Amino acid sequence: MKKIATALVGISLGLSACTTTDSPSETEESFSMPPAPIAEQRPYSFTTHGITVEDPYHWLKDQSYPKIDDEDVLAYLKKENAYFEAWKAPHEAMIESLFEEMKGRIKEDDKSVPVKDGDHVYWSEFAPGTQYRLWYRKPATGTAADAKPEGGTLLYDENKAAEGVEYFRLGAMSISPDGKLMAYSTDTSGAERYTLKIRDIATGKDLETITEVSIGQPVWTNGSDGIVYTVVNDNWRSDKAFFHKLGSEPADDVLLYEETKDPAFTVGVGKSTDESLILLQTGENSSDETYFTSADDPTQPLKLVKPRAPLQQYDVDAAHGKLWIVSNHEHVNFALYSADPADADSWETVIEGSDSFYLQGIDSHRDHMLVEGRVDGLDQLYLRDYASGAMERLPFAEEAYSASFGGNPEYAPDAYRVGYSSMVTPGTTYDYHPADKRLEVLKVQEIPSGYDADLYTVDRLMIEARDGAMVPVSVMRRKDFDLDQTGKLFVYAYGAYGYAIPPGFSTARLSLVDRGYAYAIAHIRGGDDMGKQWHLDGKLDKRENTFNDFVDVTKGLIDAGYAKAGNVAAQGGSAGGELMGAIVNQAPELYGAVVADVPFVDVLNTMLDDTLPLTPGEWNEWGNPIESKEAFETILAYSPYDNVTAQDYPSMLITGGLNDPRVTYWEPAKWTAKLRATKTDDNLLLMKMNMGAGHGGKSGRWNSLYETAEAYGFVLDQLGSE
């Protein structure tokens, strides 16, 4: 199914691995930190539902936002950055060593496996020493598996495009069906307002430009005469879809759809696998609706599949003259339906909903339907036969792994592309050949500095939470790691929006594991690791289950011998940063070091401000405290910023992005300021604010990796290594 992303979601920063170096205590001299920055407290309060909340750091939200020019605000952020740099200076050698170690595990001139699409195969590669990708194609000969990533025509050089800017991100790239044109979008600030351009591939010349578009992939008409795209409004919400006819002025683009019913809904566009339909979906985190029109002429009237309804979600694809629909309207774990496009609201059940099988999505190719789901928290991939309905499961041997279909743009490919990894198995790209039921290895992630999987093992545990729920945990450790509480433990989780953290491979992670750490991924409620109900049991009035799960998993791992209390590090980003804020309020004694990346910690204030990009679309995840006193009280009871108390906290590293439209910069800034003024310990508290980036931190593969080295360096500085 051509999944259309309509909801802004949190981004968790990647974690990876390495070889050992001396511990910080052996390589660095002791030093004294300068005095920490102290933010002024300015009286401010508000009253909602008869409840008054004091917020003395409200002033750190620049009142001219999204313009940020308040000198007091900027001065405070710069002081915090200077304080971070003061800590970093004597640890620079360790961080640089970690970075070089992590970098040594990454193939500098790495190339992706070519993907066949029409008359060409496409791939990307890195040149040695570069931060960004080069994108190539060449004429297709034979199957996609026969193609080698060499030679070909350079379509786009991200490195050249990134020259002279502090931040760069290629948001989307889409080749026209006739293969002559390329639509692509870029962001050079981290603010997620993209510029869309159309390039003539033969000449390399950009022909047309459209500004203020969303991150979503532009969709070409079948005749290659225009594109459908979405734009962002003043509040960063994608509320309109336009058709741009090549050669016309953007001001004359045809408005295909505008979301006017609900400000929480955002609009996305896609194309059916059989390429017959352009799909327009509007929705938020728990409800959506889809329209379709001809991919030959998208100005034809839109047809609605099924009207929106509260808590009803569905996604649509097309093949063999039918619509194929995955929906939760009858079962929480979703079911598959078919419909005649002429009567799109009349659905026939194809695969019934199941308590044990969580149906996540489908892609309807000519010969098979690709079905993705999850059983007991593990990915399951199936090929479904249209005629018989038989489901063939792709075999994977490991007990814990991550697998998905991907790189299958053609309607009738010879084989189906699959991605696979586990916590000990590097990323592997396969082609699955249905005729002989064979997985063909096309590429295994290369680790230049070396990697011996036999040194490591993965534990799959079920730990009981305080309410009796059994929470799965995946733990990677060296085989010589003893379960006698003498080691160190690093716990990572996200736990929101129904997004699972699969037990996949990470090279950077080895830098902790090889230093005596066990690395755990807690598959806590709020994600959909154990099915859709797992997500529902961690949102709205059940949100605190997410935090309790993480704390209870930590206690369970301590009891199992992975570490002692205080020798545990934790990390989470965005909504996972909210998790970090909640767990240090609830059980600070368990953790010795916590990294909270772009943390969503000022939850109450953000959910009360309906002008912010995320807020209206997030009410079905967190609750609407504007309308509901109960939601107000629920959020107030756990919001990390509002619940900072006079107690000892672990050492903490907090990050943010000045241009972040998802978790605005003042959330980590206010939280840091309040922690400094309130906590009763002398433990290290650092905040690093990226002044030229957004939600995902710095751009470029080495810049991003260096930030991981900084985070791990902080953990090793505070907890040490074996």
Image: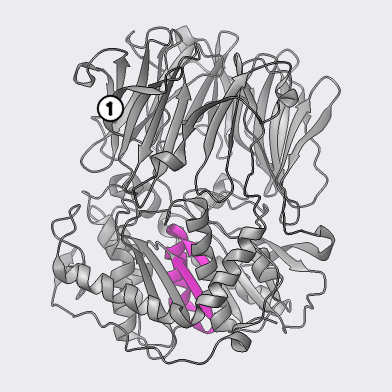
Relative to 76, residue 599 above or below: above
Q: Which residues are magenta?
A: 571-596
Disc 1 secondary structure class: strand
Residue at image point 77% right, 32% down = 393
Q: Is residue 593 magenta?
A: yes
Place of residue 75 in the rendered image (x, y in percent of width and height, measured from the top left): 21, 72
Place of residue 397 in the rendered image (x, y in percent of width and height, measured from the top left): 83, 45
What residue is shown with label 1? Answer: 210
Relative to 329, residue 248 above or below: above
Q: On the rendered structure, is 412 left or right of 28? A: right
Q: How many neighbours does mark 1 have within 10 angstroms: few (below 14), some (14-19), or many (20 or more)? A: some
Q: Is residue 218 magenta?
A: no
Label tally: 1
Q: Is residue 508 visible?
A: no
Could you say which quadrant of the image residue 373 lies in? top right
Place of residue 322 in the rendered image (x, y in percent of width and height, measured from the top left): 56, 12
Residue at image point 60% right, 28% down = 362
Relative to 464, residue 290 above or below: above
Residue at image point 51% right, 63% down = 706
Q: Amino acid at mark 1?
A: Ile
Q: Is residue 515 visible?
A: yes
Could you say which quadrant of the image residue 473 lies in? bottom right
Image colouring: one colour
Give 211 or 352, whichever is nearer the viewer: 211
Could you say which quadrant of the image residue 49 lies in? bottom left
Relative to 629, residue 34 above or below: below
The N terminus - image quarter: top right
Q: On the rendered structure, is 72 left or right of 537? A: left
Give 295 or 511, whichever is nearer the viewer: 511
The C terminus - image quarter: bottom right
Place of residue 351 in the rendered image (x, y in percent of width and height, measured from the top left): 65, 26
